[in-house]
Image (cartoon, rainbow, N blue to C red):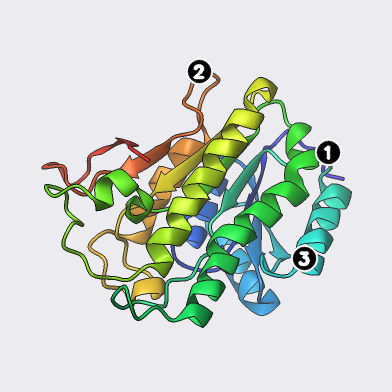
């Protein structure tokens, strides 16, 4: 069991993109970072890269769509650290794009499995360890595309977007899960929030986003390090429609 006072943070899908940068930034804040990855080799490679920057990091093999893998990961953290202070549900997929009316249901199911059921399964499995933290923080990496208010605003930046149902629906559902967890854990001192990193250049979108993965990860860092009087149960992050490209704030669900 970890005998240090360093906060313990787990980031799923941390071997690349926003997940890797989130692990990096949390580690540079002095946290011990558990690099969650379904591929053990890639997780170990990410850990080596983080260690070169002075980050204390450990690989944690976890496939968020596999109940046995999630349970084994929770047992490993229980044995090695005895608690969890920060959980970042970052692992996600983006596929099944197209127009409404031609939805690929197989792709939709996979998107929901990773983007919604994965974070719920992981949060549930680690809830006991989070409750042992004096100030637990849960960050669900979501998207402004999961905001019904934003997507249906005729003056908003995404009103004319034609991307199909799966990805936005999965993030809208994740936002609801975030709100429910926040409400149910409010009396424990936990903060459960959804992060909107903005459109970042990652493998998820062929590196087409105008923001960097590190810029997106700074949204995660903010929510993962909230003070006691910080918000609970909000979607916070990059405001795509704001004149200032670096603007951040609370978005309507």
Residue that mark 3 sits on = 67
Residue 186 % position (x, y)? 62, 25
Q: Does residue 97 appear in the picture of this structure?
A: yes
At a point 83% along the width and 38% down the height, the residue shown is: 3
Q: Quick one: quadrant of the C terminus? A: top left
Q: Are marks 1 and 3 in contact (CB under 8 Å)?
A: no
Q: Are marks 2 and 1 in contact (CB under 8 Å)?
A: no
Residue that mark 2 sits on = 229
Of all residues, the one furthest to the front in this rendering is 101
In which quarter of the view is residue 207 placed?
Answer: bottom left
Q: Is residue 45 above or below residue 4?
A: below
Among numbered discs 3 and 2, the one appearing first in the sequence: 3
Question: Which type of secondary structure does the marked residue at label 3 adopt?
Answer: helix
Among numbered discs 2 and 1, the one appearing first in the sequence: 1
Q: Distance between the residues labelled 2 and 1?
A: 28 Å
Residue that mark 1 sits on = 3
In which quarter of the view is residue 4 placed?
Answer: top right
At a point 59% along the width and 29% down the height, the residue shown is: 183
Residue 26 % position (x, y)? 54, 45
């Amino acid at each position: 069991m970890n005998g240090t006072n360093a906060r313990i943070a787990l980031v799923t899908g941390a071997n690349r993109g926003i997940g890797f940068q989130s692990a990096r930034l949390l580690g540079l804040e002095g946290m011990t970072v558990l690099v969650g990855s379904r591929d053990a080799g890639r997780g170990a490679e990410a850990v080596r890269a983080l260690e070169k920057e002075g980050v204390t990091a450990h690989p944690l093999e976890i496939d968020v769509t596999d109940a046995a893998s999630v349970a084994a990961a929770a047992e490993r953290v229980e044995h090695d650290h005895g608690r969890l202070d920060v959980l970042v549900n970052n692992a996600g997929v983006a596929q099944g794009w197209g127009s409404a009316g031609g939805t690929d249901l197989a792709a939709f199911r996979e998107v929901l499995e990773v983007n919604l059921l994965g974070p719920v399964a992981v949060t549930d499995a680690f809830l006991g360890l989070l409750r042992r933290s004096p100030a637990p923080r849960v960050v669900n990496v979501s998207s402004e595309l999961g905001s019904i208010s934003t997507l249906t605003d005729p003056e908003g930046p995404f009103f004319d977007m034609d991307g199909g149902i799966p990805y936005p629906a999965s993030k809208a559902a994740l936002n609801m899960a975030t709100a429910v967890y926040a409400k149910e854990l409010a009396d424990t001192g936990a903060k459960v929030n959804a992060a909107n990193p903005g459109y970042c250049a990652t493998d998820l979108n062929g590196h087409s986003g105008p923001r960097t993965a590190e810029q997106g990860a700074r949204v995660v860092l903010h929510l993962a390090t909230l003070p006691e009087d910080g918000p609970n149960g909000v979607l916070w992050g990059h405001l795509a429609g704001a004149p200032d490209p670096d603007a951040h704030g609370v978005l309507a669900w």
